[in-house]
Amino acid sequence: MPLYEYQCPDCDARFERLVRSSDSAPKIACPTCGGERPERLLSMFATSGPRSTGSASSAASDCGPVG
């Protein structure tokens, strides 16, 4: 199930909801004010990739157990 971030235009509250992919138009209400027309936001997501600073040995230590 994807996790979506919403913002309520009535009270400006931001919140997240897990939404089933089978729901074509899920009913989402603001948990703060009960508003029934929250807007889905574009969420930022993390990626992994080459680092611009640091040495190769420090970058390798962040990858997990070795051996």
Image (cartoon, helix red, strand yellow):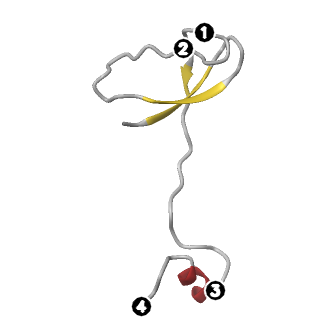
**In the rendering, which numbered label is found on residue 13?**
none
Q: Residue furthest right?
A: 11
Residue located at (40% from left, 28% from top): 19
Which of the two discs, 1 and 2, labels the residue nearer the N terminus?
Answer: 2
- Which quadrant of the view contains residue 10? top right
Which of the two discs, 2 and 3, labels the residue nearer the N terminus?
Answer: 2
Residue flagged by tag 1: what amino acid is it?
Gly
Which of the two discs, 4 and 2, labels the residue nearer the N terminus?
Answer: 2
Residue located at (65% from left, 27% from top): 14
The residue closer to the viewer here, 43 or 14, is 14
**In the rendering, which numbered label is found on residue 67?**
4
> Label 1, on which residue?
35
CB within 8 Å, label 3 to label 4: no
* Secondary element type, mark 1: loop
Residue flagged by tag 3: what amino acid is it?
Ser
Q: CA distance from mark 4 to mark 2?
A: 49 Å
Instruction: Provide residue 42's location: percent of width, then percent of height.
Output: 54, 34
Relative vertical location of residue 33 with respect to residue 5 in this rendering, above or below: above
Q: CA distance from mark 4 to mark 1?
A: 53 Å
> Label 2, on which residue?
29
Near mark 2 (Cα within 10 A), the count class, few <14, some 14-19 or many ≥20, is some
CB within 8 Å, label 1 to label 2: yes
> Label 3, on which residue?
55
Relative vertical location of residue 42 with respect to residue 12 in this rendering, above or below: below
Image quadrant containing the N terminus: top left
